[in-house]
Image (spheres, rainbow, N blue to C red):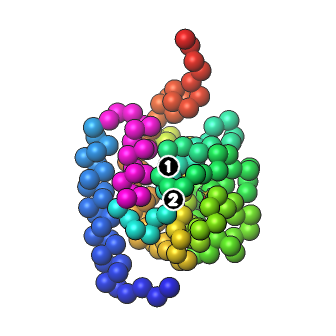
Amino acid sequence: MKRTKDHFSRLNQKYERIYTQLQELLAKSPHLLSKMATTCALLHHKLSHFFWTGFYILIDQELCVGPYQGSLACQLLAKNKGVCWAGINNKKTIIVADVHQFPGHIPCDSRSNSEIVVPLFDTEGNIWGVLDVDSCQFEAFSTIDKEWLEKITALLKPNPEELKWLFLAQSNL
Ligand code: SME
């Protein structure tokens, strides 16, 4: 889809405002899970090209769905298959203009046509999951989304202890 310079400049300004609002919101809770839930809620409701917005978290070598907004998600993603695992294995942001052309793409909702996956790193540089966004439009995501979503996910950066405590904690009741 052909987009004008004006479109990209408006999108950039929108991300700037979202980033400022998120910084304020995330400072209000020290908890990673609250930060994740708030991040995907804000992005999902402010950006009209976002159809599904959420996290997949690496737990015991599996990618499990985390906080999300949008239609019902796949709970676990088959290992080393699809866009999210490509983001994990390559440790870099993946932009897919047409998901139907992506080998092994996992369709959780047939209305999705393009996707962006941003890897999440802890303070030691270990990958612990991805932010995944789907759009109903083809070619919905550009380097503007990539740059801002990388900056936004960097606001979450937990330390390894926090991750262990949150996602691998066993009940001690
Ligand atoms: N399409 C993703 C699966 C997750 S959903 O988009 C919510 C993939 O291929 O990994």
Say which amino acid is labelled 1. Answer: Tyr
Quick check: can you spot residue 122?
A: yes
> Which is more N-terminal, label 2 or label 1?
2
In the picture of the structure, the residue carrying the numbered disc 2 is 52
Q: Is 156 on the left-hand or right-hand side of 57?
A: left
Q: SS of the residue at dot 2?
A: strand
Q: Position of residue 68 (x, y in %)?
A: 49, 49
Q: Which residues are magenta?
A: 29-45
Quarter holding the C terminus is top right
In the picture of the structure, the residue carrying the numbered disc 1 is 68
Residue at image location 32% in from the left, 43% down from the top: 26
Q: Is the residue marked 1 within 8 Å of ligand 1, measured from its CB?
A: yes
Q: SS of the residue at dot 1?
A: strand
Nearest the viewer among 115 and 154 is: 115
Mark 1 and mark 2 in contact? Answer it, CB < 8 Å: yes
Say which amino acid is labelled 2. Answer: Trp
Disc 1 and disc 2: Cα gap in Å? 8 Å
Q: Is residue 143 above or below residue 2?
A: above
Q: Is residue 38 magenta?
A: yes
Q: Is residue 76 magenta?
A: no
Q: Is residue 171 above or below residue 94?
A: above
Q: Position of residue 105 (x, y in %)?
A: 69, 64
Task: Rate crowding at label 2 as few (under 14), some (14 to 19) or many (20 or more) other CA atoms within 10 Å.
Answer: many
Give the quarter of the image for residue 116.
Answer: bottom right
